[in-house]
Image: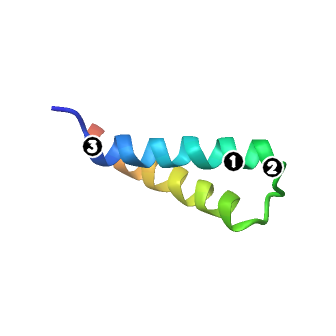
Amino acid sequence: MADLYLRNLESERKALWATCRLKGLAKDTPERQRIAALDTAIAAHKAKQAG
C-alpha cells in the first residue's frame, strides 16, 4: 500500500520548492523554513519505516 503521508509531504515540498525557485525567495522566508521542516519530517518518517 502506498504511504500517503509520505507522498503528501513530498508533494508539498516539491510545490514549495518550485515556488521558491520561481520567485527567487531568500533562505529566511517562511516558505523556505517550511521546506526545512518538511525535510526533517520526511527523514524522520523514513527512519521510522526503516527500523
Q: Secondary structure at mark 1?
A: helix
Category of crowding for the residue at label 3, using alpha-carbon neighbours closer than 10 angstroms: few (below 14), some (14–19), many (at least 20): few
Category of crowding for the residue at label 1, using alpha-carbon neighbours closer than 10 angstroms: few (below 14), some (14–19), many (at least 20): some
Q: Residue at x 55, y 60 (%)?
A: 37
Q: Which mark is residue 23?
A: 2
Q: Secondary structure at mark 3?
A: helix
Which quadrant holds residue 32?
Answer: bottom right
Q: Which mark is residue 19?
A: 1
Report if residue 51 is visible in the image. no
Query: Residue type at mark 1?
Result: Thr
Which quadrant holds residue 26?
Answer: bottom right
Report if residue 45 is visible in the image. yes
- Please state, as top left, top right, bottom left or bottom right, where the N terminus lies in the image: top left
Query: Residue type at mark 2?
Result: Lys
Q: Which mark is residue 37?
A: none
Give the alpha-carbon distance from disc 1 to disc 3, as whole Å.
Answer: 22 Å
Q: Position of residue 15 (x, y in %)?
A: 57, 44
Give the alpha-carbon distance from disc 2 to disc 3, as whole Å.
Answer: 29 Å
Which colouring convention does the figure follow? rainbow
Judge depth for marks 1 and 3 and give the one in front. Answer: 1
In this rendering, the answer to whether 9 lies above or below 32 is: above
User: In this rendering, would 30 be left or right of 50?
Assistant: right
Q: Position of residue 10 (x, y in %)?
A: 46, 42
Q: Earlier in the sequence, mark 2 or mark 3?
A: 3
Q: Which is more toward the observer, 48 or 24?
A: 24
Do tag 2 and tag 3 residues touch (Cβ < 8 Å)?
no
Q: Residue at x 44, y 55 (%)?
A: 41
User: In this rendering, would 17 be left or right of 23?
Assistant: left
Q: Which mark is residue 4?
A: 3
User: In this rendering, would 27 be left or right of 35?
Assistant: right
